[in-house]
Image: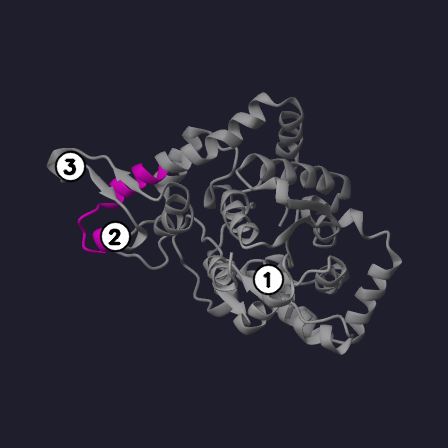
Amino acid sequence: MDINKKIELVKQVGEEIVTEEELKEIFQTKEHPIAYDGFEPSGQIHIAQGVMRAINVNKMVDAGVNFKMYAADWHGWANNKLGGDLSKIQICGDYLIEVWKACGMNVDKVKFLRASDIVNNMDYWKRVMQIARNTTVKRITRCGQIMGRNDGDVQQASQILYPCMQCADIFELEADIAQLGMDQRKVNMLAREVGPKLNWGKPVVVSHHMLMGLGKPTSASTGAERGIDLKMSKSKPDSAIFMTDTEQDINRKINKAYCSEKIVEENPLMEYAKYIIFEKFKTMSIVRPEKFGGDLEINSYDELVKVFSSGDLHPVDLKKATAYYLNEIVRPVRDHFEKNKKAKELLEKVRSFKVTR
């Protein structure tokens, strides 16, 4: 595959790339550059972390990138997830990896790691210290968004340590590309600033879109804080479709989801269609009675936008179709966790844990 095609694949993943010129240079100098993404193991995994993440990782792999998926268990511990119980967080890390393996990710070309794998390395903590020495408390506090928190939410000292650790991860994992969500942008930009000062290099940042939650947008916040308020949350179970939700769960959540007639912007049903359904199926069939216009076959997201914004597709019909396709996507993962003994035991343990923000 030539370099331009590789870049086009990465651009399908990145809502923002800093910078495209540097990305091109990486592909010119390295046949298989390294990219990584990391998640706190903090409860059941939702569809954005599962299916959408698999879609994006597969595109990066197709572009020739060696991808590292990172279960950031120590980071979840620092962020007081699951009540700050590291053993529970590590069990969630095993569950996280099990989901990724079951939801269509090209696992043969992905390396799975845990923070627990690298924290015993003294050189890692030297990196953390060097990053801390080359930034300020104010700057680190502004990175609170990476933990799903607004600036004023960061309270524990461990949460100050977290961004320094995540910044160090990029260099410890030898990542040429930090390929995380837009909510992780601030710490990735910090890495671009401190890396050259410490002669560690300068990672390219490829930030993917954050799938919004299913509820109605009500926050008056703007910018980064609005991004936190809009995205789905494990602590609000009805804000997201989880990878082991039953068909009844999916139908119920989608039926009550916000979907204002003719409105495309900040409409979670349209986001699910764009970033998940059309990526997996390429077409979307709308089944409805003749008195409501009969069946529709929609062949692209742009076509869906046109039909929905004109009023030719009612939210009720969009919801029915969305629920159907999401159930088809989740079904293989749900089946895996029902039939595989190890996976089933992991899920039962994770479900028993109390999710804490």
As measured in the structure, the alpha-carbon distance from the residue carrying label 3 to the one carrying label 1 is 44 Å
Q: Earlier in the sequence, mark 3 or mark 2?
A: 3
Disc 1 is placed on an element classified as: helix
* Residue hosting label 3: 294
Part of the protein shown in magenta: 304-323
| Image position of 3 (left or right of 39) | left
As measured in the structure, the alpha-carbon distance from the residue carrying label 3 to the one carrying label 2 is 17 Å
Which mark is on residue 176? none
Disc 2 is placed on an element classified as: helix
Task: Give the quarter of the image for residue 205.
Answer: bottom right
| Label 1: how many Cα within 10 Å (few below 14, some 14–19, many 20+) | many
What amino acid is labelled 1 in the image? Answer: Gln
Q: Is residue 278 visible?
A: yes
* Residue hosting label 1: 184
Task: Give the quarter of the image for residue 156.
Answer: bottom right
Q: Position of residue 25 (x, y in %)?
A: 59, 70
Q: Is residue 262 above or below residue 235?
A: below
What amino acid is labelled 3 in the image? Answer: Gly
* Residue hosting label 2: 303
